[in-house]
Amino acid sequence: MVGQGVLRECLLDPEVETVLAIGRNATAHQHEKLREIVHDDLSDLSAIEGRLSGYDACFFCLGVSAVGMNEEAYRRVTYDLTISVAKTLAKLNPTMTFIYVSGTGTDSTEQGRIMWARVKGKTENALLQMPFKAVYMFRPGYIQPLHGVRTKTRWYGAVYAMLGPLYPVWKLFFPKYVTTTECVGRAMLNVAKRGAPKSVFENQDINGVSRPGLGVEA
């Protein structure tokens, strides 16, 4: 869902020259700036490495819900796959900015009781050691989909159907914990273009940096 949002903002941004979308399924978008690679095994990009050079930024939006998954299975998708992709891109694009979509509540200590938060924290920590030009962690809270963006997770869809109409209320009373797909996408673009004085962006930071000319506190 976040990937759909940032793709939309990239295609709308006149400063973005080319977008390469890599996933297991096509995006269903048609645009002169968009290139796509449909690749079944995202943990092994060796077959497509020749097409991955020359990019300024990677917006890594792939992820799964931890509901119903044990730690080993969740780690394979969340940590192992992410780090494998990042290693390939760092080798091919050392001047790249890498932005990873994590989540509110991520455990940077890797020692907490919540499984998904530990694994996300381990992933963040490993990415921050990668030899990219810059690495940033985005930790959104509740994300309201806009502009036709939809989640691919069925039970998420049911939740959004119930909570979506109440978004103005959540935004009014809990502004630090809610955002939109548009805000996340714009924030990722702004940080990739201008950089930032911090590596971890909580939900409030994301909303702040999504607006033109505004940044985040160090």
Image (cartoon, rainbow, N blue to C red):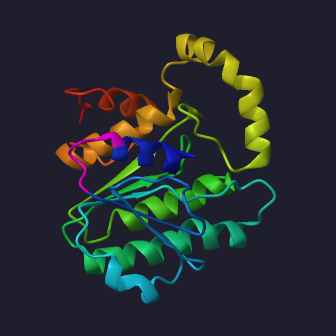
Q: Which quarter shows the C terminus?
A: top left
Can residue 33 be seen by looking at this rendering?
yes
Q: Nearer the viewer, residue 98 or 128?
A: 98
Q: Main secondary structure of the magenta part?
A: loop
Above or below, 104 relative to 112: above
Residue 34, image x and y in percent?
38, 58
Q: Is residue 118 left or right of residue 95?
A: right
Quadrant assignment, res 134 = bottom left
Which residues make up the magenta segment?
A: 12-17
Can residue 111 be seen by looking at this rendering?
no
Q: Is residue 13 left or right of residue 163?
A: left
Quadrant assignment, res 127 = bottom left
Residue lying at 33% horizontally and 76% vertically, measured from the top left? 52
Above or below, 53 relative to 176: below
Residue lying at 58% horizontally and 80% vertically, measured from the top left? 41
Q: Is residue 14 magenta?
A: yes
Quadrant assignment, res 161 = top right
Residue 213, image x and y in percent?
19, 27
Above or below, 94 relative to 115: below
Residue 10, image x and y in percent?
35, 46
Q: For the view shown, which residue lies furthest in the bottom direction? A: 47
Q: Is residue 105 left or right of residue 204?
A: right
Q: Is residue 98 magenta?
A: no
